[in-house]
Image (cartoon, grey):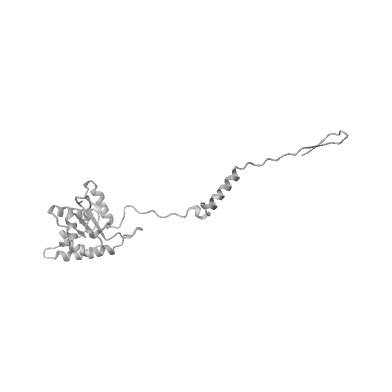
Amino acid sequence: FVSYSWTTPAYKDRVRDLAAELRSAWGLDIRLDQWHLRTGEDPYHFMEAEIVAADKVLIVSDAEYARKANGREGGAGTEAQILTPELYRQGGGDDAGGPLPKYAVAVTEYNDDGAACTPTFYGGRLYIDLTDPTRRAEKVEEIARWAHDRQLHVAPPVGGHPGFLENGPSTGTHGVRARALAALAAARPTPSVRRRTTWTGSSMGSPPSLLV
């Protein structure tokens, strides 16, 4: 379900174009009031029912949506009352590949202070930035990935234990002492064999014998 503010006719067209692209190019069954709210039906009831039934709710937020949501005005104000407790109950997603959060904001405008126009109830959660036309394709894909629960980057699997965990300690006092002793042993010269020579002979002048 796509939620937004009827800021201007041109803005309504922009949101409808986004919804149409997500529906036709990214395989998402987008629910939008411009298509599914029929003459004579209650827009507030429609909005509440869609929020409850939807697998994902995308809030396309500009300054007008943020203002109405924060002031509890109109449809955006009603949504704020519904979504505030929902967002507090919403988990942060599953980094092991499970479902991503149900609610996300796509920002289409920044305020005069340079801050994204997000409603207060959304808090400091990450949003999708649709303000840069040159990155629109990238950001539309980000919306589609969120809706399909497929993050662009996922953590690789954890590998096996490193060898030093199996071979005992390699750091600390014991390891330093062992390495020092090994280095000394390697540097110590090989002892040479001394030969002791003794001359013996008889008093009669016989040839000496050599003892080694």
Q: Quadrant of the N terminus?
A: bottom left
Residue 133, given in percent of the width and then of the height, sits at 21, 47
Residue 132, given in percent of the width and then of the height, sits at 22, 48
| Of the pair 130 and 156, the residue shown nearer to us | 130
Please give the name of the residue rendered at 50% of the width and 55% of the height, measured from the top-left corner.
165
| Of the pair 157 and 111, the residue shown nearer to us | 111
Relative to 142, residue 207 above or below: above
Please give the name of the residue rendered at 24% of the width and 63% of the height, measured from the top-left corner.
84
Q: Is residue 191 left or right of residue 133?
A: right
Q: Quadrant of the C terminus?
A: top right
Residue at the extreme left: 40
Q: State the image quarter where residue 80 is shown.
A: bottom left
Q: Is residue 205 left or right of residue 112?
A: right
Please give the name of the residue rendered at 55% of the width and 48% of the height, measured from the top-left corner.
179
| Of the pair 163 and 78, the residue shown nearer to us | 78
Please give the name of the residue rendered at 15% of the width and 53% of the height, measured from the top-left corner.
11
Residue 20, given in percent of the width and then of the height, sits at 19, 54
Residue 143, given in percent of the width and then of the height, sits at 25, 54
Number of labels in the image equals 0
